[in-house]
Amino acid sequence: MFVDLDIENCSVLLCGEATRTERVALKFAQATEVLRFNRVEDMRAPGTPVGLVVLCVSDEREAQKWRAAVLSSGIGAPSIVDTEVPAESQGEVFLIGAGPGDPGLMTRHALEVLSQADVVLLDHLAPYQDLPRWAPHAEIIDVGKIPGKHRVPQREIDQLMVRYALQGKKVARLKGGDPYVFGRGAEELYVCEKEGIPVKVFSGVTSSISLPAMAGVPLTLRGVSHMFTVVSAHQKLTDSELDQLSGLLKDGGTVSILMGVKTLPHTIAGLLERGVRPDMPMVTVQDGFRAHQREYFSTVGTCLENYDQLKPPAVTTIGNVCAAVGENREELMGKAFETH
Ligand code: SAH
């Protein structure tokens, strides 16, 4: 609301409660000086000319109190007195898990908040085809694009999110899968929190479970696997991580690996070295829920034979449960029913 005012050569006075004035201060980075008054008794005219007095208040009673203080402070006529956006039209951020790519796996909550959004910041891997229909009023910004192979840096995404929210907009941050599974959801929430921006988090269906499921593999199965781990292999796994994963697999658990295509040879060598059976079944689902989805069933011992065909994004699931598909299915399901 203040964007057209020339405030470069003057002071801006922000009046009101500390958290409000702090948030509003971000809008006036260009002003010569930004003074904040959190108590009416501290109100005074500064040395530089005052271009703007902003009342950062939530109701009319508080506004009247501050107007009176401004008038009696001797600031003089040229000042403009305005009010900060009322609480109900303040911006906010929705951190939305959009699922692994199939629009059918978006939650009803996700669709409902998208319909209210003014801006959508779209992530790599989030479903996007129907966005103009889901978010009919929104400006849609694809921050997951890979211009010249580089995605928009996280810092810029954070800045965009904050800037729009401080302009009073409802910002939908649409993320693939679940925002709290390797989705930087908690970090983005923290960035907003520091700016006093309210955030709501909407869980989504994570690829770590839904991609193997799509291929017919349950991560747990009675009598076979009663634990699973989701691991990021964006960086090569450490010796200690490989020790733990091998232990888990040997105890019958299941491991789902995300961001692990590049490092797969290292991961597999590490598991075999630690005594994981070469005939341990596994599946990699590539481009899940896309038209070109591919499923590669193999074993720990054979999975690298066709490694050159494998391309990210993909989720690799290792564990006895992967025999739920294939010739050993009867035997595996037999185990599940033995314990009934
Ligand atoms: N928050 C997401 C994960 C983000 S990390 C979630 O909960 O699913 C990105 C990684 O997720 C990719 O490298 C890949 O390993 C996996 N992934 C997510 N969606 C995928 C898809 N549709 N197909 C294949 N892999 C996917």
Image (tube, grey):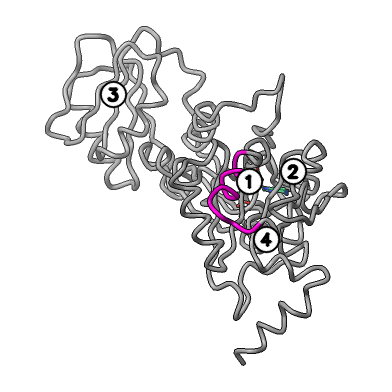
Q: Label 4, on which residue?
A: 280
Asked if residue 115 shows in the view, the reply is no
Q: Position of residue 198 (x, y in %)?
A: 43, 47
Instruction: Locate residue 56 relative to residue 327 in the image: left or right.
Output: left
Residue 82: x and y in percent read 38, 30
- The structure residue drawn at horizontal position 59% and vertical position 58%, both measured from the top left corner, is 255
Q: Tag 2 or tag 3, which sits nearer the N-term?
A: 3
- How crowded pointer 2 is (Cα within 10 Å; few <14, some 14-19, many 20+) is rated as some
Q: Position of residue 32 (x, y in %)?
A: 32, 11
Quarter holding residue 234? top right
Amino acid type, mark 4: Met
**Amino acid, disc 2:** Leu
Callouts 1 and 2 close, C-beta under 8 Å: yes
Q: Earlier in the sequence, mark 4 or mark 1?
A: 1
Read off the magenta span: 266-277
Name the residue tied to disc 1.
Answer: 268
Q: Mark 3 sits on what residue?
A: 13
Q: Amino acid at mark 3?
A: Leu
Q: Residues within 10 Å of mark 4 (few under 14, many from 20)?
A: some
Question: Would you say the residues marked 4 and 1 are in contact, meaning their CB atoms lie under 8 Å apart?
Answer: no
Distance (Cα) linking label 3 and label 2: 65 Å
Main secondary structure found in the magenta portion: helix
